[in-house]
Amino acid sequence: MRASRARRGALGSPRSAPRGVRGGSPTEMKGQNTVFVCQSCGAQSRKWLGRCSECDEWNSLVEERSSSAHGRSDARSALTGEGARLYADIESSDAERISSGVSELDRVLGGGMVPGSLVLLGGEPGIGKSTLLLQAAARVAETGRSVLYCSGEESPHQVRARGERLGVTDAPLYLLAETCVERLLEEVTRLSPGLVIVDSIQTMFSSKLESAPGTIGQVREAATQLLFAAKGRNVTVLIVGHVTKDGNLAGPKVLEHVVDTVLSFEGDRHHAHRVVRAVKNRFGAVSELGVFRMTATGLETVPNPSQLFLSERKSDAPGSVVLCSIEGSRPILVEVQALVGTGAYGNAQRVTSGVDRQRLSLLLTVLEKRVGLHPTGEDVFVNVPGGVLVNEPAADLAVVAAVASSMRNQPVLPRVAVFGEVGLAGEIRGVTQAGLRVREAAQMGFTRCLLPLTNRGPDIAEPGCELIGVGTVAEALEGLFA
Ligand code: TYD
Ligand code: MG
């Protein structure tokens, strides 16, 4: 199949060239202004096909509006309604960010909401997306800016009932139960709100397409119309997107290209705290992190996450090490736990939560080859409590130390925090933002910080926190169990 596609690609018309619509010329009759476009090769068809007749890909046809149906004949931009302008004449819009009233949300957005931006908040069902956005909507409305909260999932009564739990008072907050994006945009025109919230994008549909809500074509069309509305009216639009179990935005990975900012709402439903992370941000740093706690009266911000993540740590337990990690621009101390047990019948298990499993395998081999510990035949479990994901290389040293501590059944020295990347030769490599990490450790009362030798210098010294530079894994383990 792949080979035949390549051959056709080489002989036939190039991938990006516009193709004629199969099955007759486009007409502008109702129901006739859409085409089905193959997402793999771009071929178009009048009717839906299970398999693309051009590239033989299965299930790749998605309903879209045909380009003539967009109805633009002039040369002006659909986003701003203007022609080209000189760079020097364009004023920067960074000054006028709007606070969402929720400090941790502002932080992940890069300092507040940017007017004219389209923000996607993704997360599993029940994690608290509607709660967070209703809280933000109410806070923004309290400042006198009108807010339109459009729910395609709940009736205004349900939203109101939740609002009462959250302590939302009478503010210019408009609730709309609507799933048709054109109707929603009419309301936006009528009310001209300062903030629009759409919960959720999977329930919205455009009357211009005939496919069901939630399909790729519908989700993309609805998001595109909201994008044009956001840019054209200079209003912030926040949309909710449900995420499937495997962590993808249900169906529309395409959405990530359309929106300006993608926030991911993560956390374990069985724990109270939640993490909002910026995955993509045209207006700020990515992997910026906001931490919340779910309470009976909504989401509460957690200003000091290090304290939260270390609050239940047993410091004298073997296999527990404190890592100074960086999320976006924010240093956070987290605990890395390891448990090493005898593997059964050569079926060694590697189970991780919060760190990468492949990375763990690599680090175990480094421990075996460079230090002489033998964890490779054993079951190894590594966990970062609190639902935090540490996928930066600086976490390596903490993982290695936790595994070694569990294998020796000996706790690491008290009040010591670590960070550093481990190389294949067993060397400890320097990481970024060492100063920030050390400062956070000192602030949280850690008296010793084990760090890469190359990062150690007078510029990052903190009073009351001894810096121990290490060059190899063996040296690091010596320093931790002395
Ligand atoms: P919700 O915002 O409806 O989730 P989503 O929109 O992401 O599907 O929140 C759902 C959960 O939050 C629900 O299980 C109940 C819990 N919750 C609280 O614990 N306290 C509250 O004040 C609210 C409103 C919800
Ligand atoms: Mg919801």
Image (tube, rainbow, N blue to C red):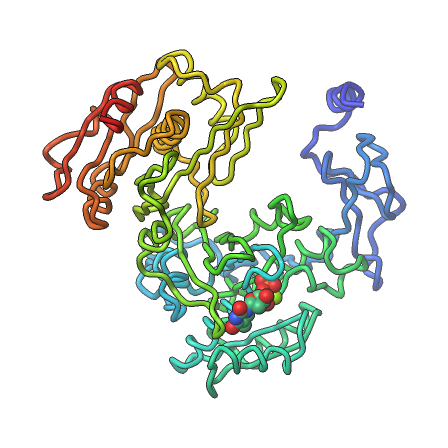
Judge left or right: residue 149 versus residue 172: right
431 over 93 or under it: above or below = above
Is residue 130 at least partly visible in the picture? no
Depth check: give the residue in front, 334 or 194: 334
Q: Which image quadrant: the N terminus?
A: top right
> Residue 75 appears at what percent x and percent y?
57, 55
Q: Residue at x 65, y 58 (%)?
A: 72
Residue 34 in view in this figure: yes
Quadrant in the rendering for residue 347: top right
In this rendered view, identify the residue nearer to me: 254 or 247.
Answer: 247
The image quadrant where one finds ligand 1 is bottom right
Residue in view at x 63 percent, y 72 percent: 151
Residue 13 location, x and y as percent?
75, 28
Q: Residue at x 61, y 73 (%)?
A: 150
Residue 228 relative to residue 302: left or right: right
Number of numbered labels in the structure image: 0
Q: Residue furthest right?
A: 23
On the rendered structure, is 128 left or right of 473? right
Residue 264's x, y, as percent? 51, 52
Q: Quadrant of residue 16?
A: top right
Q: Residue furthest bottom?
A: 170
What percent of the width, then of the height, locates residue 351?
55, 33
Which image quadrant: the C terminus? top left
In this rendering, the answer to whether 102 lies above or below 423 is below
In the displayed structure, 67 sits above or below 127; it is above
